[in-house]
Amino acid sequence: MSILCGGPLLEGVCCLACARWAWKRCLHTAGHDSETWGLATAEEFEPVPRLCRYILAVYEDDPQHPLWEPPGGYGINPDWLILRRTYEDNHGRAPPYILYLDHDHADIVLAIKGLKFSKESDYAVLLDNKLGKRKIDGGYVHNGLLKAAGWFLDVECDILKELVEKYPNYTLTFTGHSLGSGVAAMLTLLVVLHRDKLGNIDRRRIRCYAVAPARCMSLNLAVRYADVINSVDDFLPRIATPLEDIFKYLFWTELTNGSLPCLLCLRCMRDTCILDEKVIKDPRRLYAPGRLYHIVERKTNRSGRFPPVVRTAVPVDGRFEHIVLSCNATSDHSIIWIEREAQRAMDVMLEKDDIMEIPAKQRMERQETLAREHKEEHRAALQRAVTLEVPHAYSSSKYGTFNEVADSHRWSGESSLGSSKTRENWDELIERLFEKDESGHMVLKKSQRDD
């Protein structure tokens, strides 16, 4: 009888727990994920709105006669435009892009266009992946995006090398939106791993700004490359379900006259409810790459938009794993809207900081301090990943030389300590050359001493 009486009570408790979870999910805003992050400075955020305008210029058929330029224009000098590639030029291997030599900011910029819904080749790149299909540098990546990035490097390697050597004080920046941001992140990873192809370019000259990126690399790689890759958040990194699976559901929904939206909803709900501890331990799960920048412009239980605030961090756990229920999710993904809000955020920073009035020497000191802080934050994130036992994660060397050695040797899944085959070779060498004496110490074998 007591068991029968306890049944309704247990059912009531479960219903209350589910109702509490649903209420918290409905009240969860984007700002909750980054509320503990630090505020970005105008110096570090300055490239974002400018690069967004360069990406927008890729959408123009004729940059000299623009049709969609934002207020103030794209900021592109047509004489500095090195090359421009369309879908026809790329033969469906990669999205359109431009290569721009920005003398005003001492920057070589490769800007890549985002997903075009009417282009089958873009879907071919996006859908060419499944969980754990491609492994590189001790982690997993999106196979289709990596193949597109490899095509970029093969085709444009010579001209990039020429520009890098001709302008040794210029940075090399890869940027893109949506699908293009994933390709840009993968291209940055390949260039860092194969710097010899670009004349042994210094790693500090390489950087990437992925605007509204798709999940494209595993957690250990996302944290490890946070010193060169930066991501500007929107709703795509928050979708726990792989994008290729979402588009497959959408295609089947179209073919079956709308009979499968419930399956897509259930799949997203299931992926969202997976425990964080289990998620972190999955080495194949993909994340938004690098350091994250979050433009916050809405507040809980408040309507309308507020002056945007930009927060930044290199998070390990809680890396935008919660979907935000918002009617503005798709519009916030638009590159036009991101450029507008990024510029508004930049204007707010400049008003508060008056950075343009700071003397050059003091501005340089601030940049050095910022670089030092970012380096320490990156090292702390690497250590945090090790503490949380993220698969294939390791902490950096104190003196900064370990990463450079590791970069030149790691490929196709080798870890920072070398492959198991290398360790076995060392063990065999030690066993062949040394032996223990009577006191238990290792000494050189007699046969080796005679030689």
Image (cartoon, helix red, strand yellow):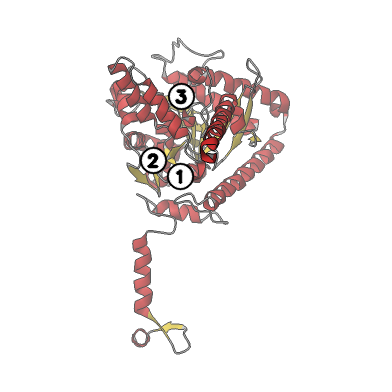
Q: Nearer the viewer, residue 401 or 163?
A: 401
Q: Residue at x 46, y 19 (%)?
A: 56
Three-letter amino acid code at disc 1?
Leu
**Residue wearing tag 3:** 80
Badge 3 element = helix
Disc 2 to disc 1: CB gap under 8 Å: yes
Real-space CA distance between mark 2 and mark 1, rounded to the nearest whole angstrom: 9 Å
Q: CA distance from mark 3 to mark 1?
A: 34 Å
Judging depth in this view, the residue of 285 and 293 nearest the camera is 285
| Marks 2 and 1, the one that precedes in the sequence | 2
Q: Residue at x 36, y 61 (%)?
A: 420
Mark 2 neighbour density, 10 Å: few (under 14) some (14–19) many (20 or more): many
**Label disc, if present, on residue 221 of the rendered structure:** 1
Give the residue drawn at x 42%, y 25%: 265
**Residue 305 percent coordinates (x, y):** 63, 17
- Neighbour tally class for label 1: few under 14, some 14-19, many 20 plus, Cα within 10 Å: many
Q: Is residue 298 left or right of residue 160?
A: right
Vertical order, 3 against 338 (above or below): below
